[in-house]
Structures are given as structure tokens and as C-alpha cells.
Image (tube, grey):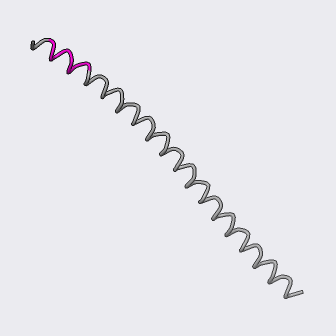
Amino acid sequence: MAKKDKLTAVSVKIGSTLGKANKKAHQLSQAGQVAKEELHAISKQVEELKRQLEKTTKRLKKAIT
């Protein structure tokens, strides 16, 4: 019976280690998704600022001439 107890203990350790690794991988995956969404939002803001700059440039050129 001692052999089965050791095997059970080892299998529990392996299972818990795999569970922890899976949890960490899931957390990293979620962090990557959040970063991707933030990057998309920032790129939208940059595009909007570009459009505003183009409009302002046109107005200034028109005002100067």
C-alpha cells in the first residue's frame, strides 16, 4: 500500500502543478487580449488626431492665403 500512497501523492503534485501552469497561461492569454484591445483603441485615437490635424492645416492655409 505504501507504493500506491506515494504514487497518489506524486500524481496529486503533478496535477496541481499542471493546474497552476494552466492558470498562469490563461492569465497571460487574457493579458494579451486586453493589450490588443488597448492598442486598437489607441490606434483609433491616433487616426482621429491625424484627421483633426489635416483639417486644422487646411484651415490655417486657407486663413493665410
Residue 8 lies, in percent from the top left, at 81, 78
Residue 37 placement (x, y as % from top left): 49, 40
Query: Given the current orientation, which residue lies at the most extreme left position?
Result: 64
| Residue 35 included in the magenta stretch of the image | no
> Would you place residue 37 above or below residue 6 in this image?
above
Instruction: Note whether 51 is above or below 37 in the view shown.
Output: above
Q: Which of 8 and 44 is in front in this view?
A: 44
> Which residue is painted at 57% across and 49% down in the image?
30
Rendered residue at 75%/79% (across/down): 10
List the single residue furthest toward the right: 1
| Quarter occupied by the C terminus | top left
Does the stretch in magenta take in 56?
A: yes
The span picked out in magenta is 55-62
Locate the N terminus by quadrant. bottom right
**3 to the left or right of 28:** right
- Left or right of 34: which side holds 64? left
